[in-house]
């Protein structure tokens, strides 16, 4: 099939619409044109005439922008799929009847209810202008990327830093990674599965990487990616209501052969717990990955407390693992506030190495449009009008399930055909179908609550609309992130009402248990404790909170949930550690959880008033700040980048202007970008005994070779050397300049190993994690004194030609100062 671009694609579309060809022999690079072509040639004819008309408008707008907005494009339409359609004006198109068809002309959409619409509301998004480049020359890949879909480069330098830091995490360590939406956080756990961690002795066929997901839809999405990219077989997603597949997953986790598994925190802390413990005891639990990790803070204190109970599960699994084979904990998010990071550190940073890496740069793709506050009836008409004009695919976000149902019915009644709804009450089978259709580009509109979109990837989504007021700016920014994941322009439109403020405020107030009630529940739990020794106790989490008349009959899930909330708050306050399910099991009735007492005054009200009050205040302060920033955004008085900077920290993100009312009419008012750069991992890869013996006391070794008489077997031998050193823990190779070795042959082993390769012009440019590395100095390369000095954090083996010059002009091997050997000696020593 021929791929067409630009005017050639538009001309082919014109012939298809005019009935001159069937459109089967070509495809367009432009998603706008390709989307309309696919809808017209699809034999199932799922798109309605209204859907097709909106797609036609999008294609015309794309052409209008591509040609410089000089002349509104016109097309002759004689395709039978448009036969009988009479609502052209509703989608901003003028139709004039001509012989054997209609002449369709694009009209600008400049609604009176939006401010400053001189250039058309949807024009920028429909233009498909590239705002963010992926896979650039600066993002050279490591050889191991071939194991995840045959990739050869990273999507961004931030992704490269994140992958290298994650795979360098030591046994038992915890790492938080913040990486922008669209830059491929899923590659991290895919590589954990395919190549493992630096220095870890892991079987090629055994090992479990558990990925915690907040929604079933996201688990299904990740499962499909893993099947496609990692060549794995289902089932990988643990989902309620599928007992046969779930039993199979449990068995494979227990024996360490499951590989990747996607599950909710409830499943991990419940149904999967026993199997996970078995895998951990055998050293076959590679990693606990928490996707959308900001939800641990946002949801875990007052909603779905299992997000914070994961900290207890983690400690339980670390305790039973063989020394040196403890799982790593990797937490992933597109955005992290100071509050979120502090919560993760308090829950997952105790008694372990804890680091964080942020490579967040604000998204440049969204074109932000903010409607003034209105009433419900006006919003209805405004959103409906917008959905007759904005580019596809589009997501319409609401807050409540009932509203999602209402909007779905409105849209189908209006004549839209390729529209679905997804919310917290959507059943499993329907979720899978919707996620699949969204990923395949078969849906034009999805009406969703915040349950839709968490990490779900479809690159070409062009519009995100909000018929609600998100309770936090963070939620809003996450949801806007569904659009423009291909790096091209996208539209964000929010239409709020005054009633939304009441709903958002109610949701924003996190339900942290009161000091008095929490203290009462804790005393009741602790009074029935079972002592396990060393300051550890088992407490029953499904017991009643007291002996009063209104407490005596309090049982069930809601009661257990409030007990767990109590323990979660105590853990955040530093009064206890959550340690998971007691083992051996408590031989008494009830549901038990093991805790470690940190503060001996835990039962005293004064202790609660001091520590729990602080947590409650911090939670309330963070929630209120997040909500107030959402309101500040809606005021539309300053650049969104400034408002987002107040939330995520101006010094923690790379700032870049997208597009807003401030700069739409005057490009000179755009703020200069502040790039995020490529962060360096905080981990230091340890020096292994084999390398320590080679390097000697000053952490340097020079290996020389004759460049002109190098034997043909030298490349094979160098590959063997690196493979042996990699097996022992070496993870880094830097090449300076052109090499006489056959690097493809040398690095063949690295395609399936956690091994990092950087081709640099100067060692000062290295962003590799700290730790031992091999530096291959090409012929004619110049070194500076800093390159060859002793570096305890960066021990170096230099592989250089015999005649390599030192910085002072003499031969390097004559003045190196450290240990010097030739290539044959190097091979012999490593082979031993």
Image (tube, rainbow, N blue to C red):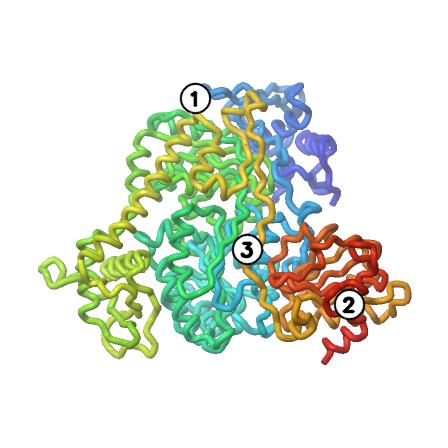
Q: Is residue 508 left or right of residue 263?
A: left
Q: Going 53% across and 39% down the picture, which residue do you hit?
A: 362
Q: If you read the primary sequence from the N terminus, does the residue marked by circle 3 or circle 1 appear first?
A: 1
Residue 102's spot in the image, x, y percent?
63, 23
In the image, is 668 to the left or to the right of 637?
Answer: right
Q: CA distance from mark 2 to mark 3?
A: 39 Å
Residue 703, numbered label: 2
Quick one: SS at disc 1?
loop
Which numbered disc, 2 or 3, marks the residue that appears first in the sequence?
A: 3
Q: Residues within 10 Å of mark 2 (few under 14, many from 20)?
A: many
Badge 3: residue crowd in 10 Å (few <14, some 14–19, many ≥20): some
- Front: mark 2 or 3: 2
Separation of disc 3 and disc 1 at Cα?
Answer: 40 Å
| Rendered residue at 14%/62% (across/down) | 546
Asked if residue 746 is positioned above or below residue 658 in the image, the reply reads below
Using residue 303 as the reference point, say whether residue 114 is left or right of it. right
Q: Are marks 3 and 1 in contact (CB under 8 Å)?
A: no
Task: Name, please, the residue furthest toward the right.
Answer: 709
Vertical placement of residue 396 versus 202, above or below: above
Given residues 131 and 535, the one toward you in this image is 535
Q: Nearer the viewer, residue 548 or 31?
A: 548
Q: Which residue is mark 1?
A: 113
Q: Is residue 194 above or below residue 497?
A: below
Q: Position of residue 709 (x, y in %)?
A: 90, 67
Q: Is residue 325 above or below residue 332?
A: below
């Amino acid at each position: 099939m021929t791929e067409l671009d630009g005017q050639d694609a538009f001309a082919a579309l014109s012939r298809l619409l005019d009935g001159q060809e069937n459109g089967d022999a070509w495809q367009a690079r432009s998603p706008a044109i390709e989307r309309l072509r696919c809808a017209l040639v699809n034999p199932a004819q799922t798109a309605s005439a209204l859907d097709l008309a909106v797609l036609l408008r999008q294609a015309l707008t794309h052409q209008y922008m591509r040609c410089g907005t000089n002349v509104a494009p016109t097309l002759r339409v004689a395709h039978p799929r448009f036969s009988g359609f009479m609502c052209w004006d509703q989608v901003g198109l003028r139709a004039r009847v001509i012989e054997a068809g209609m002449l369709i002309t694009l009209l600008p959409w400049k609604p009176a209810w939006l401010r400053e619409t001189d250039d058309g509301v949807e024009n920028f998004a429909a233009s498909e202008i590239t705002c963010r480049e992926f896979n650039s020359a600066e993002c050279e890949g490591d050889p191991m990327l071939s194991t995840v879909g045959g990739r050869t480069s990273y999507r961004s330098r931030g992704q490269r830093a994140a992958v290298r830091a994650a795979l360098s995490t030591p046994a038992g360590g915890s790492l938080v990674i913040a990486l922008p939406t669209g830059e491929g956080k899923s590659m991290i756990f895919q590589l954990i599965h395919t190549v493992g961690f630096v220095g870890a002795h892991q079987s090629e066929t055994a090992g479990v990487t558990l990925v915690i997901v907040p929604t079933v839809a996201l688990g299904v999405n990740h499962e499909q990616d893993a099947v496609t990219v990692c060549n794995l077989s289902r089932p990988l997603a643990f989902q309620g209501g599928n007992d046969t597949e779930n039993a199979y997953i449990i068995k494979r986790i227990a024996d360490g052969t499951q590989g990747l598994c996607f599950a909710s925190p409830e499943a991990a802390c419940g149904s999967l717990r026993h199997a996970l413990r078995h895998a951990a005891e055998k050293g076959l639990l590679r990693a606990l990955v928490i996707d959308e990790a900001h939800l641990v803070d946002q949801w875990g204190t007052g909603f779905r407390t299992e997000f914070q109970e994961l900290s207890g599960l983690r400690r339980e699994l670390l305790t039973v693992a063989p020394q040196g084979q403890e799982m790593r904990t990797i937490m992933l998010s597109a955005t992290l506030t100071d509050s979120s990071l502090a919560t993760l550190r308090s829950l997952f940073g105790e008694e372990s190495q804890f680091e964080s890496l942020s490579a967040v740069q604000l998204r440049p793709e969204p074109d932000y449009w903010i409607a003034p506050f209105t009433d419900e009836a006006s919003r209805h008409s405004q959103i409906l009008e917008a959905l007759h004009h904005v580019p596809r695919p589009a997501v319409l976000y609401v807050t409540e399930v009932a509203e999602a149902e209402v909007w779905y019915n409105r849209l189908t009644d209006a004549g839209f055909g390729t529209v679905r709804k997804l919310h917290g009450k959507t059943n499993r089978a329907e979720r899978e179908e919707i996620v699949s259709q969204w990923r395949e580009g078969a849906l034009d509109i999805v009406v969703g609550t915040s349950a839709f979109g968490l990490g779900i990837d479809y690159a070409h989504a062009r519009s995100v609309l909000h018929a609600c007021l998100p309770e936090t700016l963070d939620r809003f920014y996450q949801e806007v992130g569904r659009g423009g994941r291909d790096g091209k322009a996208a539209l964000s439109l929010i239409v709020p009402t005054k009633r939304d403020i009441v709903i958002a405020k109610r949701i924003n107030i996190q339900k942290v248990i009161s000091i008095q009630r929490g203290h009462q529940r804790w005393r009741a739990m602790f009074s029935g404790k079972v002592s396990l020794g060393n300051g550890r106790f088992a407490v029953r989490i499904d017991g009643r909170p007291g002996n009063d008349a209104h407490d005596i009959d309090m049982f069930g899930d809601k009661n257990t949930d409030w007990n767990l909330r109590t323990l979660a708050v105590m853990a955040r306050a530093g009064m206890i550690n959550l340690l998971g399910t007691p083992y051996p099991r408590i031989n008494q009735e009830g549901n038990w959880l093991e805790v470690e007492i940190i503060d001996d005054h835990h039962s005293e009200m004064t202790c609660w008033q001091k520590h729990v009050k602080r947590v409650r205040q911090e939670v309330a302060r963070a929630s209120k700040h997040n909500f107030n920033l959402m309101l500040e955004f809606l005021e539309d008085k300053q650049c969104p980048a400034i408002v987002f900077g107040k939330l995520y920290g101006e010094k923690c993100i790379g700032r870049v202007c997208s597009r807003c009312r401030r700069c739409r009419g005057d490009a000179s008012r755009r703020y200069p970008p502040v790039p995020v750069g490529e962060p360096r991992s905080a981990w230091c890869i340890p020096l292994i005994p084999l390398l320590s013996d080679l390097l000697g006391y000053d952490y340097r070794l020079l290996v020389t070779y004759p460049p002109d008489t190098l034997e043909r077997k030298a490349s094979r031998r160098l590959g063997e050397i690196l493979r042996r050193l990699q097996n022992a823990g070496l993870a880094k190779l830097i090449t300076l300049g052109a090499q006489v070795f056959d690097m493809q042959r040398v690095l063949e082993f690295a395609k399936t190993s956690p091994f990092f390769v950087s081709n640099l012009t100067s060692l000062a440019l290295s962003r590799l994690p700290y730790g031992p590395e091999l530096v291959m100095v090409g012929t004619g390369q110049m070194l500076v004194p800093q390159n060859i000095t002793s570096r305890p954090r960066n021990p170096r083996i230099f592989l250089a030609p015999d005649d390599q010059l030192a910085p002072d002009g003499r031969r390097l091997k004559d003045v190196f100062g450290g240990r010097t050997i030739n290539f044959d000696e190097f091979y012999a020593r490593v082979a031993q």
